[in-house]
Amino acid sequence: MLELSSITKCFKKNCVINDVSLSLHKGLHLLTGPNGAGKTTLLRILAGIIAPTTGQVSLNGISLPNDSARFKAHMGYLPQKFGVYPEMTAQKFLMYFAELKGIPASIATQKVEEVMDIAQITSFHNKTLRDWTKGMRQKVGIAQGLLNDPDLLLMDEPLSGLDPEERYYFCDLFSKLSSERIVLFSTHIISELTTLADSIMLLHKAKMQFKGSIPIMLDAARGFVWQATLSEDEWHDKKNELVVSALRADKGLYEVRIISDVRPEITGVCSVEPTLEDAYIYLVSHDDSE
Ligand SMILES: Nc1ncnc2c1ncn2[C@@H]1O[C@H](COP(=O)(O)OP(=O)(O)OP(=O)(O)O)[C@@H](O)[C@H]1O
């Protein structure tokens, strides 16, 4: 189990994480929130790269920073900007990482083969990384995170810059990997993950605004999501007073999903079931910290 108790992180007077506590068990967990919410900072704390200003982190009873080496031996981390050495092949690159992680040479070759198989990059193993697409490089990043067979796999925005097919592939992979470990990743893209994640955490204005299962997140917004079709004039008239979670324009008509505590005064408006994106907008717009 991963436990965070009362984590606060301040950069001088700017506190970007404020008293965050949570426990995560085996499974797939998403960390989302607006730009600058503190997602990368929180993941860097969990990866033992930076220390919290106050608070504790522990993984199966092993705590940071006291037992940092042992903690890191059970953790894999994919940073937001994962650099590769372009002249290396994936196999060489992963062997290099295995050495950095202290994996004994006697099992490193086999371990590298195993993770290349999981990340489905075996057939490219002899190609230098210079020639790889972003999605393929991301697979190498995930493979390096798995080298030590971690109990905790942390990934910072692993879906960014990927096309829909690649995103589907990775979500499915993370879901499979989460049957044996805690997989926690940050993302701005939440719609397609609805059925896969065991829990979702929304970090907003330094606080954990929401944490819970996807059905519970959807429940939070139920009754507050509306749909209406507006003419161009109506849309321009109303758009500044509405909180909009989705918009589709077609032949001069605007199909709008609206987040509102009360029925909006629009002809033909109807209540609709929330999507995860609606729930996200609902929670972010119902920030009660101000
Ligand atoms: N080393 C640092 N020194 C000072 N401020 C920092 C440092 N690292 C992060 N911050 C600030 O902390 C805040 C949170 O940044 P962070 O990168 O954690 O957010 P994020 O949620 O990951 O954002 P994004 O979704 O845009 O990647 C930002 O205001 C950022 O400027």
Image (tube, rainbow, N blue to C red):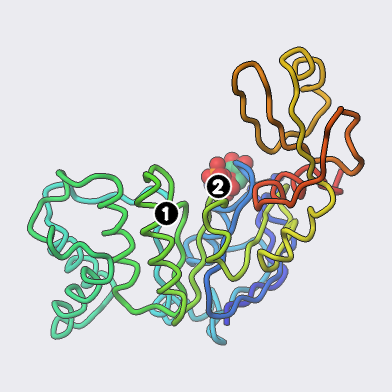
From the viewer's perspective, tell me whether residue 85 is left or right of residue 249. left
| Some atom of ligand 1 lies within 8 Å of the CB belonging to the residue at label 1 | no
Choose between 255 and 25: the one closer to the eye: 255
Q: CA distance from mark 2 to mark 1?
A: 10 Å
Q: Residue at x 31, y 59 (%)?
A: 141
Asked if ligand 1 lies within 8 A of label 2, the reply is yes
Q: Position of residue 72 (x, y in %)?
A: 42, 75
Disc 1 secondary structure class: loop
- Which residue is at 25% across, 69% downward? 100
Residue 209 x, y percent position in the rendering: 75, 56
User: Where ligand 1 lies, by image quadrant?
Assistant: top right
- Residue at the top extreme? 233
Q: Earlier in the sequence, mark 2 or mark 1?
A: 1
Viewer-proximal residue, 174 or 232?
Answer: 232
Q: Residue at x 26, y 52 (%)?
A: 137
Decide: few, some or many residues near mark 2? Use Cα within 10 Å; few <14, some 14-19, many ≥20: some
162 horizontally vs 244: left or right: left
Question: As rendered, which of 278 and 188 lies closer to the eye?
Answer: 278
Q: Dot 1, crowdedness within 10 Å: few (<14), some or many (≥20)? A: many
Q: In the drawing, what numbered circle is on residue 260?
A: none
Which residue has dot 2 on it? 188
The amino acid pointed to by label 1 is Pro
| Above or below, 289 relative to 74 | above
As drawn, the label of residue 158 is 1
Residue 194 location (% of width, % of height): 58, 59
Q: Amino acid at mark 2?
A: His
